[in-house]
Amino acid sequence: MDISLVPPHLAGDGAFLTATTDLVNRVYADAEKGLWREGAERTSPDELAGVVQAGELAVARLDGHVVGAVRVRRLDSGEGEFGMLVADPDHRGIGLGRRLVDFAEGWAREQGATTMRLELLVPREWDHPVKEFLRGWYTHAGYRPVRRGSLADDYPALAPLLATPCDFVIYHKPLSA
């Protein structure tokens, strides 16, 4: 398995963008079932093209096929952040998610970050089984909740797309050298 940043020139590759967007949307449709109104999608080819152009998308390839992805970036605060973490359901159980997170953390260290951050969208009034799994998975990987934010306050354009009231929990993990 190879994990690497996507070269910015692939921001113009329609086939790559469509396939990767489809993977992200397919994984999130299952992982966030019940959180969003019908028809809401996690990303679009245009949005993903901007992420690729910015040098913020890493993909995992197995036998030449994209089987996972993660967005990495350095925040103005100096923290590293990862998001849009996806593993193809046909390739789960082989450590793909862990390897993508390891890649993201290594990337952040190379950028001089001493803290890694992630945001986990969670329903406010009920427990979502996938979100509960992820909470435990991230905690086991060393991430700790540091703040709970309101999706409506921090991402007002997304709030009307929600099917249920949601917040996001911000997690941090110290990065060692």
Image: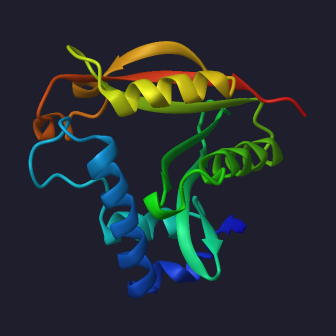
- Looking at the picture, the colour scheme in use is rainbow
Percent across and percent down for residue 72 are 60, 50
| Residue at image coords 54%, 67% | 67
In this view, 137 is above or below 57: above
Percent across and percent down for residue 118 are 53, 33
Point out the residue furthest to the right here: 177
In this view, 105 is above or below 156: below
Q: Nearer the viewer, residue 158 or 141?
A: 141
Q: Nearer the viewer, residue 88 or 40?
A: 88
| Residue at image coords 72%, 68% | 1
Percent across and percent down for residue 137 are 57, 29
Q: Is 51 left, or right, of 115 in this rendering? A: left
Q: Nearer the viewer, residue 60 or 57?
A: 60
In this view, 69 is above or below 143: below
| Residue at image coords 29%, 26% | 128
Q: Quadrant of residue 112?
A: top right
Total marks in image: 0
Q: Is 100 left, or right, of 54 in this rendering? A: right
| Residue at image coords 11%, 55% | 39
**Which quarter of the rendering shows the C terminus?**
top right
Q: Quadrant of residue 165?
A: top left
Percent across and percent down for residue 18 are 35, 77
